[in-house]
Image (cartoon, grey):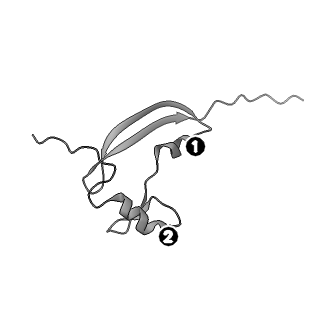
């Protein structure tokens, strides 16, 4: 059984090159197009912290995922919930 590929933040072909090439057309760094026309966006893990700032984080897990082109990459799973709100019954 072959050993798994190591996790690579810059797989062959280089995300960094793709990010630079598509930064101007999309107005932001981290966006790229695939050969079949999909537009994708990779985000740094800290971005999710700000995105979910109003939620309660229940669990976070780092994992290895297989990309669309068969490479391995670092994945992040976050289980979060909206905080409970306490509603008061209106008084009459």
Residue 39 visible at all: no
Report the quarter where the C terminus lies.
top right
Residue at image position (68%, 31%) is 85
In which quarter of the view is residue 89 placed?
top right
Q: Residues within 10 Å of mark 2 (few under 14, many from 20)?
A: few
Image height of 68 relative to 20, above or below: above
Location of mark 2 (residue): 24
Q: Residue furthest right?
A: 92
Q: CA distance from mark 1 to mark 2?
A: 24 Å
The local secondary structure at tag 1 comes to: helix
Report helix, strand or loop for mark 2. helix
- Nearer-N-terminus badge (1/2): 2
73 sits left or right of 45 in the view: left
Crowding around mark 1 (Cα neighbors within 10 Å: few <14, some 14 to 19, many 20+) is few
Name the foreground residue: 50 vs 91: 50
In the drawing, what numbered circle is on residue 77? none
Residue picked out by circle 1: 50
> Percent position (x, y) of residue 82?
60, 35
Residue in view at x 28 percent, y 44 percent? 7
Is 41 on the left or on the right of 8, as rendered? right
Q: Position of residue 19 (x, y in %)?
A: 42, 62
Instruction: Point out the frontmost of discs 1 and 2.
Output: 2
Q: Closest to the observer: 63 or 79?
A: 63
- Image height of 52 relative to 86, above or below: below
Q: Position of residue 29 (x, y in %)?
A: 48, 60
Residue 61 placement (x, y as % from top left): 40, 34
Q: Residue at x 46, y 37 (%)?
A: 78
Q: Is residue 79 left or right of residue 65?
A: right
Quarter of the image with the N terminus is top left
Query: Left or right of 4: which side holds 77?
Result: right
Asked whether 11 or 67 is in front, the reply is 11
């Amino acid at each position: 059984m072959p050993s798994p590929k190591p996790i690579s933040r810059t797989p062959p072909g280089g995300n960094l090159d793709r990010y630079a090439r598509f930064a101007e057309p999309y107005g932001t760094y981290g966006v790229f197009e695939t050969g079949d026309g999909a537009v994708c966006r990779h985000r740094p893990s800290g971005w999710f912290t700000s995105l979910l700032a109003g939620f309660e984080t229940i669990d976070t897990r780092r994992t290895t995922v297989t990309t669309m082109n068969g490479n391995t990459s670092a994945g992040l799973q976050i289980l979060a919930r909206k905080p409970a709100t306490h509603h008061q019954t209106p008084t009459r």
